[in-house]
Image (tube, helix red, strand yellow):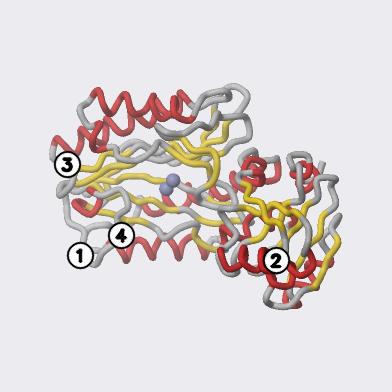
Amino acid sequence: MTRIARLAGLLEEPLLVAGPPYVLGGQANVRYLTGLESSNAALLVEPGGGATLYADFRYAARAREVEDVTFVETARGLLPAIAELLAGRRVGFEEAHLPFVGYRALVDAGVDAVPTAGHVESLRAVKDEGEIAAMRRASALSDEIFGALAEERFTGRTERELAWWVERGFREAGASGVSFSTVVAAGSTAGSPHAVPGDRAIEEGLLVTVDAGCVLDGYCSDCTRTFATGELAERLAEIYRVCLEAQLAGLAAVGPGVAGRDADGAARAVIEAAGFGEEFGHGLGHGVGIQIHEAPTLRQESTDVLEPGNVVSVEPGIYLPGEGGVRVEDLVLVTDAGCERLTQFSKELLTVE
Ligand code: ZN
Ligand code: ZN
């Protein structure tokens, strides 16, 4: 069954899938359903299964090639044009993606616009064979870059310099881009989970967290490794050991039928038992696919239950403000039996120069 047909099976009323131009998140669902990569397209899916694709003339040639949809070329102002065409109808819209200005265009034209959430995301959460193959390739490329990075000198270079080294490596190896700005966080910079690479030279005796991902064939990879620049103070060595143990506990917990919050809890219990519970301030992981953050989520407040075909990150971290931090992250595929690691680069603490 096509993705559009599966979506139609979830609907009680027509759903307008539309997002703001130039925001990947807004257009990711259109791309997932149609294969059309665009900054300005929308798709109306009828509960009976028919679908209409709207785009302006820049995308018209490619939009006409999309199978099983009726294509309607619109003005560049996509939503006002669609609103005119749908006047008087009751139509669902995605509350997380439609900008308010688009909503207002629908309402002003007389569309009975009804908010909906999560239909396409629930389909995207379960990857098909082609998607899994793309994510394996993206993860293999990530392994290659992390392997090469481990041979590089860290000390005396800046976090920004190494971050660019990683990003250039991805692009030169064929990636179409990075799935998020590469994080290289040394010493006290790594004491915060969302560190921004800076311009100070990396010194000896630090933990250096590198969180990086590429986009290959439209799918993201996501991997974090933490390296040591020489001999570490005992407390830094300890948080590495604890974090790795927690990550392995998280991996062991991930499997079909497991609640996202329980997978999180399995890793969190290890970190709490070691006395660092307060220093693990984020969730265990998130779904990855067309976007770097998608369903399902693995965190304490998650209501998601894992199923085969989910691709999620498993990434506990421990952050000691002013001292340093550690995070170890793999991307895994949920299988019928448990999970399979897609990122396979070594998780032993690697000492770099
Ligand atoms: Zn990451
Ligand atoms: Zn991640």
On the image, numbered disc 2 is attached to which residue? Answer: 41
Q: Which amino acid does label 2 sit on?
A: Ala
Q: Which of the 4 image quadrants contains residue 67?
A: bottom right
* Neighbours of disc 3 within 10 Å: few (<14), some (14-19), many (20+): some
Q: What residue type is labelled 4?
A: Val
Q: Which amino acid does label 1 sit on?
A: Arg
On the image, numbered disc 4 is attached to which residue? Answer: 196
Camera-nearest residue between 190 and 94: 94
On the image, numbered disc 1 is attached to which residue? Answer: 200
Residue drawn at 59 percent across, 66 percent down: 20
Report how far apart the C-alphas of labels 4 and 2 lie in the structure: 33 Å
Q: Are marks 2 and 3 in contact (CB under 8 Å)?
A: no
Q: Position of residue 342 (x, y in %)?
A: 53, 39
Q: Position of residue 101 (x, y in %)?
A: 58, 68
Residue drawn at 62 percent across, 50 percent down: 115
Residue drawn at 75 percent across, 42 percent down: 11
Report how far apart the C-alphas of labels 1 and 4 lie in the structure: 12 Å
On the image, numbered disc 3 is attached to which residue? Answer: 232
